[in-house]
Image: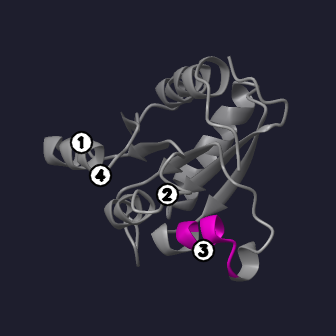
Amino acid sequence: MNIEKHRFIILLAEDEPADAHLVKAALNENHILADLHHVLDGREALEFLHREGQFSDAPRPDLILLDLNMPRIDGRGFLAAIKLEADLRTIPVVVLTTSEVERDVVSSYDLGAAGYITKPVDIVQFIAAIRCMSNYWVDLVRIPQQT
């Protein structure tokens, strides 16, 4: 069980507005009490985590949902970057992408992803996938306390 009493904080790195909207809708549909912060690419995600620029007051996320194929810094580059930083590498990163390519799955885990979810095309299946993901990451798993 998640011992922390604060709302669960999720950082979503996703460049497609429709997919970001689907994640938000799925969280709401599943009554998941989470603060969702959305950035458009890996560069913005790094700025968020480093509290730079417009993200100077950004909270530390409990979980990062990461699309692989984004402009500027893609999901692979983002994963490689944060796993090199001692204060960021403990944040679980779940890849949430349309790619079903096996090399993407393998490379994501090699780079330190905590999970890999292929986005279902069907909205009902997408909502169910977000529910299963949140049951695990929000309700079941213990996340390291924020420092």
Image spot of residue 118 (x, y percent): 35, 37
Q: Is residue 44 above or below residue 28?
A: below
Q: CA distance from mark 4 to mark 1?
A: 10 Å
Q: Amino acid at mark 4?
A: Leu
First reached walking from the N terminus: tag 3 or tag 1 = 3
Residue found farthest to the right: 5
Q: Is residue 35 magenta?
A: no
The answer to whether residue 104 is above or below residue 118 is below
Residue at left offset 50%, top offset 64%: 15
Q: Amino acid at mark 2?
A: Ala
User: What whole-number distance in Å separates the C-alpha atoms at marks 4 and 3?
Assistant: 20 Å
To which quarter of the image does residue 139 belong? top right
- Dot 3 surroundings within 10 Å: few (below 14), some, or many (20 or more)? some
Rendered view: 8 above or below 127? below
First reached walking from the N terminus: tag 2 or tag 3: 3
Judging by the rendered image, the residue that carries numbered circle 1 is 105
> Mark 1 and mark 4 in contact (Cβ < 8 Å)?
no
Question: Does label 4 or label 3 sit earlier along the sequence?
Answer: 3
The residue sitting at 15% across, 41% down in the picture is: 102
Look at the magenta stretch and give its main secondary structure.
Answer: helix
Q: Which residue is mark 3?
A: 47
Instruction: Name the residue carrying label 4.
Output: 111
The residues bearing labels 2 and 1 have C-alpha atoms spaced at a distance of 24 Å
Mark 2 or 4, nearer chain start: 2
Q: Secondary structure at mark 2?
A: loop
Inspect the image, locate mark 1, and give the three-letter code of the amino acid beneath it.
Val
User: Residue lying farthest left?
Assistant: 103
What's the distance in space between the residues labelled 3 and 1, CA to CA? 25 Å
Asked if the stretch drawn in magenta spans residue 49, the answer is yes
